[in-house]
Image (cartoon, grey):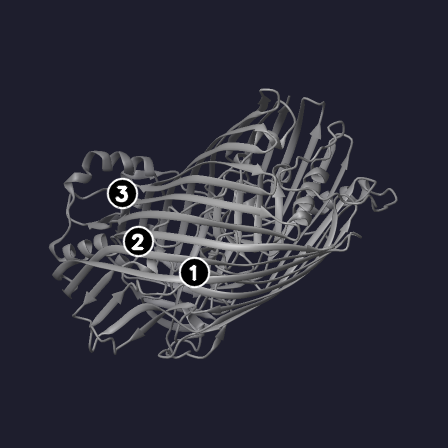
Amino acid sequence: MTPRHPLPVAIAMALVAAASNPVSAQSTAAPTVGHDDAVTLDTLEVRPQFESQMRAIDFKRSSDAIQDTVSSDSMGQYPDKNVGESLQRLPGISVTRDQGEGRFVVVRGLDAGLNSVSVDGVAVGTPEDSIRAAPLDVIPSDSTERLTVIKSPTPDMPGDSIGGTILIESASAFDREGRNIRAKAELGHQSLSGITSPKASFNYSDIFGGGTFGVAFGVSYQDRNYESDNIEVEYDKDEDVSDGLIPIEVQQRKYSINRERTGVNLNLDWRPDDSSSYYLRTLYTDFTDAETRQNSIVPVGEGDFAQIGDGVYEVTGIDPGDFSRRVRWRTKEEETFTVSAGGENRFDAFAVDYKLGYTQMRERVEDEVESRFDYDGDDDVSLILDQRSAVPTYTIADSPAGGWLRNDNYAFDRFVVAPIWVDDDEYSAALNVRFDTDRVTWKAGVLGRWRERDVNIDERELRVGPDINLGSWTSNPPSYAHGNMGDGIGSGAMNDYLRRFLDQYSERPQDAAANTEISLIEDYVANEDILAGYLMGTVDFGGLRVIAGARVETTDFEATGNVVDLEDEETIGSIGKRNVSSSYTNVLPGLHLRYDTQNDWVFRGAYTHTIARPSFGDISPRTRINRDDEEVELGNPDLDPYKSRNLDFSAERYIGESGIFSVGVFHKDIEGYIAETSERSHPDYADFDVTMPVNGDDASVLGVELNWQQHFDNGLLFGASATWLDTEFSLLPGVDRAGEKFALPRASDRLYSAHIGYEQRGLSVRLAAVYRSEYLDEIDSDDPDFDIWVAENTQLDFTLDYKVSDEWGFFFEASNLLDEPLELYQGSPANTLQNELYGRTYVVGAKLRF
């Protein structure tokens, strides 16, 4: 039988053939290396995979917490575009994607908003308007030195980490020996679009002043142009037509995307003597996402149905005005800036370290406009709808034939203008004191964080103005994998028209209330102050280390939002302000055990308490009152944080310098899981349906992690990891599915990764795969047929690196070799909700090192 994917099979066969020498595992004892110690590496032979694997394992073995690490060398061996993509290679980690790129990181099946993220020890915020999750596609991998995911924090670490703590570290000059200059240039080609895009990076570090002063500088830039082909289907139920779901609308979407990433970091270190060190860390990233979306809406369910076969229907009497063609343009710019300065001083048995930090995150979407046009046909349209495949197909009969595909046949409907501004600033200060006695090491510290957020989301529909001939915006028909989209619509022509004439368009009087409501209801200004302190002790009993302590965190939150009171859909009764505040204190005890047998085995156990603060969208003081429909939508500033009691156990067998086999078991009992409810008994809104988020039922996570990595004498490398999750929570009373057990949203119950590589002399090759099972994305409180699932996904990548000399080499990367789409389905896999294709990406480039 011919293989479905011949290129990956050929690569795998080549790797096996290249490694056909007899295999024997290395048996050198693994050194224990502290986090501040440099690992001396062999520079005469190219072994980037071996070196990065050895670094990561050294960090894991020497740590007191349960954690996993990936180093910069390792990132260089993957075709990863950002930090989120790099982290998915670690056990128990998956990513949620945006336009094919990993954006948010899911740790052990828990939503990204339940993680904490820091850059060089300083917590970072989010440019998103309503969530706490930090997007990691905005940070290029080239701007970092190592990434660590801590899964069981010790009391000296922030407690807001039910999922995990993600540490992003940029390079210090003391991470390397002497002067180090690295440069990389590459070209990436996407098969779907046929577009080739550049990327480059430069890193410099050196140590001066007799080994006391270090400078590390890095800059990276990527200008990526690519496309995606998307089809989305909306379903509903109609007992007169079918016992199951039937499609009522199909949307064809073609995306043309330009993503620019710029990263700059400058780090200074001064170590005047063995007992003192001082540092400055800075990182700036700019992520600009310019996107054109052409969208055709086919109203397959807007007519009269007649079944003409099994899963095949004739639909007649469709109003041509229900067909729509749209084009949207927007440029989203997200900026991240972090700076921290601090030091450490040691005095015999006493040490103190301190840090001041500032993070700034910005999101600006100032030019988003969607232009909408309706089919201006004279006669009703009919079609044949075939639902026998997961993505329904259709054949349209209109007059003139194919007229629904031509821009000239569409009339202007409206412009939708939707700018967004988000500012997120945080100041922080930390002080830690350590005191060593004969038996116990005591450590205590305080941390203050002062956060300010300002969110402004506007949207207006403009329907009154000059008529537009959509035909004047026509461009070449786009290539589209899911069918025929007809004429293209040029965003350049649209933007040129908007620059000249947008100010001539206005809202209809009956739209004024809705425009005002949408432009006010999501706006808020918030301040969140966190004060934390901890005390912990560390005792060693031979090979057993015991860490016990507690952390106390006090949170003060205040915010101002808008109250919009609608008499009906066209009339605003009143607009006001809502000022709210809340305060809570959490005590977070922790106990860690680490037993090193000094014979290649390390055993760990931890019992910890952690929290996760509610999302900003849930606690914002928004209030929407619709008196005509007797409905109220509220934010809930009185929400308590998620609270979790965590148990972790792991056994780790270290094999030689760079090998490990580990197994871990963990359990999380999460109290007050936040869910949205609807009630008619709210004391402030009698006889209204009030929808608001509340602290609900408990949730639980039970999981097992396996990890095996090994390097062999003949140059072969192998690694595999697996995570199995069992998550559970239930909805609150008041809905049809109350008491039903669900998996946590975005929790895949199976995560697998594997790689096989080969390194010898100047050659390094690697084939890597990551798999995650399906997960529940949205829950319908009344009907499981309307639950939204994200289908399983496997990503296969290949890299080849060849070092021609000590100064330069070249590389080749191929990502998404299986060309798997992002696929969502409703209720069951038979009902595809979204299918988005990205194609394969190939990269060639050169590296320089001096």
Q: CA distance from mark 2 to mark 1?
A: 16 Å
* Residue 318 locus on image (x, y percent): 30, 63
Which element is circle 2 on?
Answer: strand
Number of residues whose C-alpha sits closer than 10 Å to that of mark 1, classed few (under 14), some (14–19) or many (20 or more): some
Residue 521 lies, with reference to residue 759, above or below; the image says below
Q: Which mark is drawn over residue 470? A: 3
Amino acid at the residue labelled 2: Ser
Looking at the rendered image, the quarter that the N terminus falls into is bottom right
Q: Which mark is drawn over residue 394? A: 1
Could you say which quadrant of the image residue 240 lies in? bottom left
Q: Which mark is drawn over residue 324? A: 2
Nearest the eye: 447 or 810: 447
Which element is circle 1 on?
Answer: strand
Amino acid at the residue labelled 1: Tyr
Q: CA distance from mark 3 to mark 2?
A: 12 Å
- Mark 3 in CB contact with mark 2 (< 8 angstroms): no
Which element is circle 3 on?
Answer: helix
Chain-order first, disc 3 or disc 1: 1
* Residue 211 locus on image (x, y percent): 61, 23
Nearest the eye: 56 or 811: 56
Amino acid at the residue labelled 3: Leu
Q: Left or right of 415: which side holds 293?
A: right
